[in-house]
Image (cartoon, rainbow, N blue to C red):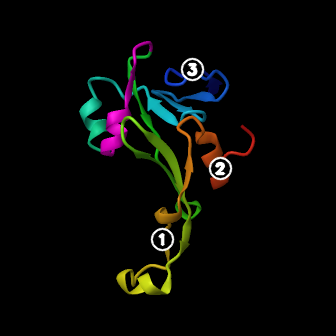
């Protein structure tokens, strides 16, 4: 079951969703791009942190009401590309990198691949405009 919830990061009341499963719930805000899970508790923090980037760990925020941590999302949709946070703790933004064919001059360095993430040409979005990155990626049309 899915329901709209208030986002504890950006206070959005329309674009933050909770997906309720049998044993846990997951959360995703399409305004600020932060996500969480009822398993992201203080007790499990070290397990979650070791799988996240340095920036993601610096930006994590504790939700006192739910007793869980929220992290900026990294959305990897294979051939559609990737959305990720980039910058510093004080000044960061969202990036959307498309998958593109490997240019001829780089093919010798990547002989087993045909495509690559074009992070050099990644589009930049404000930290409260995650939804635009999702729309540009083609994964959010009706939100």
Span shown in magenta: 52-65
For label 1, the SS is strand
Q: Is residue 67 left or right of residue 20?
A: left
Instruction: Say which quarter of the image contains residue 54.
Output: top left
Whichever of callouts 2 and 1 sits on the residue coming sooner in the sequence is 1
Which residue carries the number 3 mark?
11
Residue 62 falls inside the magenta stretch? yes
Residue 141 coordinates in the image, percent (x, y): 73, 45
Question: Which quarter of the rendering shows the C terminus?
Answer: top right
Q: Residue furthest top?
A: 65
- In whole angstroms, how far apart are the C-alphas of marks 2 and 3? 23 Å
- Disc sitting over residue 116 in the figure: 1
Quarter of the figure that contains the N terminus: top right
* Residue under the point 44% across and 16% down: 66
The structure residue drawn at horizontal position 61% and vertical position 48%, both measured from the top left corner, is 133
Q: Mark 2 — residue?
A: 139
Q: Residue furthest right?
A: 142
Q: Magenta stretch containing residue 113, yes or no?
A: no
Q: Nearer the viewer, residue 98 or 112?
A: 98
Q: Residues within 10 Å of mark 1 (few under 14, many from 20)?
A: some
């Amino acid at each position: 079951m899915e329901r709209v919830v208030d986002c504890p990061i950006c206070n959005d009341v329309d674009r933050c969703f909770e997906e309720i499963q049998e044993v846990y719930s997951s959360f995703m805000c399409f305004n600020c791009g932060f996500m969480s899970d009822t398993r992201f508790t203080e007790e499990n923090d070290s397990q979650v942190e070791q799988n996240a980037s340095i920036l993601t760990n610096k930006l994590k925020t504790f939700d006192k009401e739910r007793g869980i941590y929220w992290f900026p999302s990294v959305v990897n949709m294979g051939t559609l590309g990737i959305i990720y946070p980039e910058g510093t703790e004080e000044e960061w933004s969202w990036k959307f990198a498309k998958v593109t064919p490997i240019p001829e001059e780089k093919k010798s360095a990547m002989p087993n691949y045909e495509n690559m993430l074009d992070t050099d040409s990644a589009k930049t979005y404000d930290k409260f405009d995650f939804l635009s990155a999702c729309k540009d990626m083609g994964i959010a049309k009706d939100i």
